[in-house]
Image (cartoon, rainbow, N blue to C red):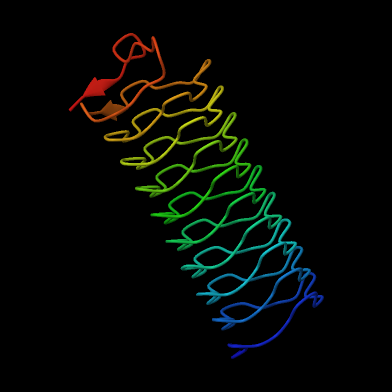
Amino acid sequence: MNLSNGRFQSFNFQEANLHEANFSNSDLRNANLTGANLTGANLRDAILSSADLLSAYLRDAILLRADLRDADLRGADLGGADLGGADLRGADLGGANLRDANLRSAYLLRADLGYAILRNANLRSADLSSAYLTGANLISADLSSTDLGGADLTRADLTRADLRGADLSSANLTRADLGYAIYSEATIFPSKFDALKAGMIKI
């Protein structure tokens, strides 16, 4: 289904079957995509700001450089999706599945990722400053060179995560699990944080 370069502002796609649809460069701002099946869809460079993607199926979807500012992605399935360079500032991804997703260089400033699954996700060089990551599953995630300044990582699971060169200044790491996570000389920790006591490994 080729819907590229289309104008679908505020359009109702609720629970629509859009499997592998091509929405590249389309304008979907404020669209209702609640529960829609967008598995394998091409949303490259699409505008989805303030769109409702609650519980949408986006597994293996292509969202490279997509504009998802303030979008509602709570409970969405984004497993294996490609969100490289996507703009997710202020987006709500609470409880979303982002396992194995590519979020390299994505913008997630002030995004809500509470209890999201980010296991094995690629977040290298992403901007997660002031993001809400309470209870998030970040096991084996690549967070190297990522900006986590001021992020809330309370009770987050960062076991075996790669934090080399990451900026964790002013981050809240209360009860976060950092066992076997790796870090480097360039990693910036909050004041008085003891990486070795937290079970981390310096590379």
Which residue appears farthest toward the left when viewing the image? 203
Q: Is residue 61 left or right of residue 52?
A: left
Closer to the camera in the image, 129 or 53: 129
Which residue appears farthest toward the bottom when viewing the image? 2
Looking at the image, which residue is at 37% across and 33% down?
167
Closer to the camera in the image, 157 or 27: 27
Total marks placed: 0
Residue 101 placement (x, y as % from top left): 45, 55
Looking at the image, which residue is at 65% across and 55% down?
76
Residue 3, picture quadrant: bottom right
Relative vertical location of residue 80 with respect to residue 37 in this rendering, above or below: above
Relative vertical location of residue 83 with respect to residue 26 in this rendering, above or below: above
Pick the quarter of the image with the C terminus: top left
Looking at the image, which residue is at 52% across and 31% down?
151
Residue 130 placement (x, y as % from top left): 55, 36
Closer to the camera in the image, 200 or 107: 107
Residue 9 placement (x, y as % from top left): 75, 77
Q: In this view, does 140 lie to the left or right of 17?
A: left
Looking at the image, which residue is at 82% across and 75% down?
12
Pick the quarter of the image with the N terminus: bottom right
Relative vertical location of residue 146 with respect to residue 58 in this rendering, above or below: above
Q: In this view, does 32 lie to the left or right of 101?
A: right
